[in-house]
Amino acid sequence: MTDQIETHDEAAEESMATLITDDGLILDPATGEVICADLPEGIEPPAQSEGARTGATLGFVEWVLSKIHARHAIRAARARQANELRAQLQSWLEDAVKQFNNEPEVIAINARIASLDSQAARASRGAEFLESAYLGALGDFARSMLAGQKVRTWQSPSGYGAIALTKQQPGLEITDAQAALAFAKEHAPFAVVESVSKKEIKKGVLNLFAGTLEIDPEWTDEAKAIVKDGFEKAQQALYASNAFQYTPASDKVTIKTGVQ
């Protein structure tokens, strides 16, 4: 049993030794896909532990933005280089004599273009991994830094880019038209006729999801109680219904590095 454990450990160490480190990311040598981030000592990612969430630090956010910025720059540079070579190649291919005289160069340029395209794609994958892995944490950090301000974009002090927050309105899809109409007819007052439009149904249901109840201050206390009771019953029925798919209001988080 001991020999088996040692063999397993040696295999694991050998596997780890073959991994590729690429400026803050660890790649699978067989596929080139990103496995995880290779954070430097002293930079800790946000964590969720026993119900307590550790927020992102400025150092962590700057590290992530710097790596995304670097990869955007590499992708842009390699794309420009590849396009310049494609233009040169196209001018040769339009001239049969030049094409014949430069055949070795044509082969070499095609190989170089393929290499540049590969490098650009690899840089894009790295940036996409970092964004998908840490976008939520970066958004939380930006919200905390911008709390109480009208500004919705946090700028990196080191010039690596910005984190932009864009308000997304709540959304509602009717997944079962008949069930939605039945719900609307039963839970007036926002829909009381069979010809009620989907727009009116959605408006009323969104108010239910949001807990928005409009009460006229001139109503009697009895009328207010009746409307409130009907609203609460409609909310309970809504949660049990499969007629709607609700998307709550949220912030869209966008990383902007400024690299074209």
Image (cartoon, rainbow, N blue to C red):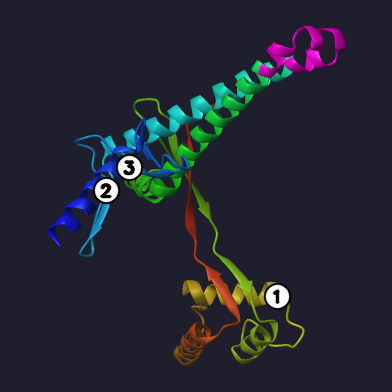
Residue at the spot of label 1: 198
Inspect the image, locate mark 2, and give the three-letter code of the amino acid beneath it.
Answer: Ala
Q: State left or right for residue 234 relative to residue 63.
A: right
Q: Quadrant of residue 44?
A: top left
Q: Which mark is residue 145?
A: 3
Considering only order in the chain, which callout, 1 or 3, is on the residue closer to the N terminus? 3
Q: The residue under label 1 is which amino acid type?
A: Lys
Residue at the (71%, 20%) spot, across then down: 86
Against 132, residue 242 (above or below) is below
> Which residue is depicted at the point 47% across and 53% down?
251
Q: Main secondary structure of the magenta part?
A: helix
Residue 250, compared with residue 56, is above or below; it is below
Magenta stretch, residue numbers: 89-107
Marked residue nearer the N-terminal end (2 or 3) = 2
Q: Is residue 212 visible?
A: no
The residue singled out by tag 2 in the image is: 11
Few, some or many residues within 10 Å of mark 1 (<14, 14–19, 20+):
some
User: Crowding near pointer 2: few (<14 within 10 Å), some, many (20+)?
Assistant: few
Label 1 and label 2: CA atoms lie apart by: 61 Å
Q: Is residue 51 above or below residue 75?
A: below
Quick one: 124 or 170, which is closer to the camera? 124
User: Element under label 2?
Assistant: helix
**On the rendered image, what quadrant is the N terminus found in?**
bottom left
Seen in the picture, residue 239 relative to 65 is either above or below; the reply is below
- Residue at image position (46%, 30%) is 71
Q: Nearer the viewer, mark 1 or mark 2?
A: 2
Residue 118: where, in percent of width, then height?
Answer: 56, 31
